[in-house]
Image: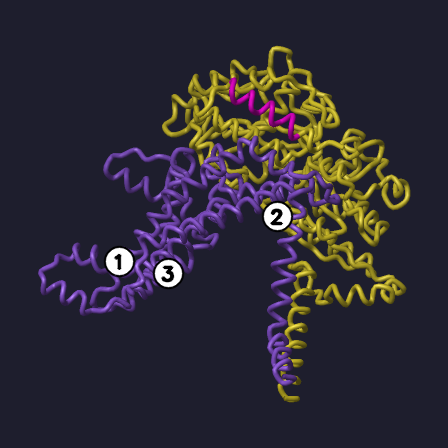
Amino acid sequence: MKKTLLLMLLMVSFVLVLSACADSEDASNEDTSSGDTSDDSSNEESENASEEEGDVNLRIAWWGGEDRHERTLEVIEMYEEQNPHVTIETEYSGFDGYFDKLSTQFAAGNAPDIIQYGGNLNDYVLRDVVLPLNQFLGEEIDVSLHDKKMLESATFDDELYGVTLGSNAFGLLLNKTKFEEAGVEMPSKDWTWNDFNEITAEITESLDGVYGTQYFGEDGFGVYIDQNDKVLHEDGVLQIEKQDVQDWFELWVGISDNGGLVPPEIQAESSQTPEQSSIVRGDVAIEFGASNQLGAYAGATEDEIVLHNPPYNDLGNHGASLRASQYFAGYSETEHPEEVAKFLNFFVNNKEAAAVLGNDRGAPVNSEIRKTLIENANELDEAIFAYVDFVSSTNDSPFVPNLPGYNETQAVFKSIGEEIFFEQTSIEDGVDYYWEELNSILDDNRE
Amino acid sequence: MFQAKKNYLIAYGFLLPWLIGLIGLVLGPMISSLYLSFTNYDLLTSPEWIGIGNYTDLFGDRVFKKSVEVTLVFVIVGVPLQLLGALLVAVLLNQKLRGLGFYRTIYYIPSLLGGSVAIAILWKNIFGLDGLINDFLAWFGIQGEGWVSNPNYAVYTLIALAVWQFGSSMVIFLAGLKQIPMELYESASVDGATAFRKFKSITLPLITPVLLFNLIMTLIKSVQVFTSAFIVSEGTGGPSNSTMFYTLLLYLKGFSYFDMGTAAAMAWLLLIFLGLLTAVVFFTSKYWVHYGD
């Protein structure tokens, strides 16, 4: 009998040990880069002891392509070398699922100390998970050389929440090779929507299997609103009217009827990834994009891709403006807020770091660093800088963050567009539904 | 007496690891999700009690209705096709053929790969505008469609994907077919029954218990379909929500739309629906399942 009990005890403890191992493995957040083997459980226990030695363990998360990963990892290594007391664990991935995973980590209270956000920073500031940075200004973080507009874009209720990793501008990517094949002249800078309508139809007509343009999507809608001297929203309160949405879809159905727009089936098959975009696959000659993506698109095809401004409207606006690409921000529950602040400062203000990071997240917001970068720019980067310059000298509209509840508002906008282009619903009904949904989502995503 | 008690203790001791798992990993999360379904919970701030609001809101939600519709189409069209396909292959593989083991393995492979991301991506390419299917159709001068990018067809390509993964039901059907005594077929042959007649009067009735099992498993699996739609539509349920399966919407609401409360409510509605569905199948089974006694 005793033997049985002993055996049982052994088995139970064995299972417990096993499950404990599994737990700590889960919690130590798949670190793919550094060979750091210290697991979380031991960290927690030795927290007090290590605090005395000054060892700091930070976790950082970002999304991006292979190129961005390599550049970012190099800068992190650089930082670790200069700050031997800091160890940085990295959690990087593509964009798919990035914010889903983050939500789960927030819910479990183990989110990374430093997190990359996009235009959805406001969604997270609203929910109090982002570290306020005013307390570090002038000490750990120096923003004296940063563009004012970019600082404003990360400021909510007079509190700064993140450092801007780069500025860019929305614009159009034009496949010059396709224009030449079609025998259509490249548009001038001051083209209008009428020109756009004609040019896209001409391309569709002249080439077999190539269409004028891809639909511009929600980001393009933002530019369109800017053209009308409006902003989408202020602090989650809509500044547009239903008629604006209606006009937008009527404009596009008009382009579609005229032959310039790619069929919805091809539209639905393309994706945000440069390699699978319609312009790279050769289905269209014009696609909407952000200036910092020129390199990625141009690199994915043999064709010559150039950056161009959106067409002007009757008010004489092209609507593209300088905007923040991404931010690094701290986690409000981080154990080392000062260390987080120091790293953020390094990432945007250190010259060597900036040289490694280049133009990947857009033009640096630190004016001195941007100057150095422009001096050493290659041809593609020069085109980007020239475009950004053109945009900021012709349009000074304020930066508008994403609509609150971005993931959902964007999904509704997308599916309504699809229903309209597939002719499953009329423009009126689609816009009615969108307007209703939009208002109810915004209600759910305000304080 | 004392000895018996001790034996119980030992038994529970051995059960302990499983009990810990059941309570910690199944019951605990279930109870907390039931609680969350009555709250407004965005994952980032603490939940706030709102009663049955999440449940009532769902019935006015157009995307929710669409997701129910898409899932029902997938179940009503897909389940019979899946069962039929699996049974057909099982009957074929029950013949006396050379290299039968080889065929059985080959035909089982799709189900091994079935749940995987790679297959969903492959599917997307096969049914794409420039995909294999359209290349094939082009030989006959037929202009193909964007099978996965056209809202009228997208869900059917996903049904085709599910039907193709017949392996696990097929193996169970095969086991059922092997149970049927050969004498029945022999005497039927003596009486001059055709192959079809034999299938209808011998195979089908005798295989109904296995059919019941497969039906329930396939129903549950189909109602919960997720991976294929998630991959093929890149997590959007598009185009125009035509692949917005119930579980995909549940996932989006919970992890993407900051609405875990509603997601939890959806999970409970799904559980109740599956419970009822299974009960109905069990209830009707006494009219069509023959246990041979």
Task: Tell me if mark 2 has few (under 14), some (14-19) or many (20+) residues whose alpha carbon lies within 10 angstroms of its own.
Answer: few
Q: Position of residue B291 (x, y in %)?
A: 31, 62
Q: Which residue is mark 2?
A: A67
Q: Is residue B239 left or right of residue B265?
A: left
Assign a secondary structure to mark 1: helix
What range is drawn magenta here?
A428-441
Measured along the vertical axis of the image, is residue A141 above or below residue A224?
below
**Which subunit holds the residue at mark 2?**
A
Circles 1, 2 touching at the beta carbon (< 8 Å): no
* Amino acid on which disc 1 is placed: Pro
Q: Which residue is mark 1?
A: B205
Measured along the vertical axis of the image, is residue A48 above or below residue A12?
above
Q: How far, Cα to Cα, is label 1 from label 3?
A: 29 Å
Q: Position of residue A51 (x, y in %)?
A: 87, 62
Q: Residue furthest front?
A: B1
- Residue visible at 49% across and 29% down? A418
Quadrant of residue A318 within the rendered picture: top right
Assign a secondary structure to mark 3: helix
Q: How is the protein colored in the picture?
A: by chain
Indicate whether residue A431 is drawn in magenta: yes
In the image, which lettered chain appears yellow?
A
In the image, which lettered chain appears purple?
B
Q: How far, Cα to Cα, is label 2 from label 3?
A: 37 Å
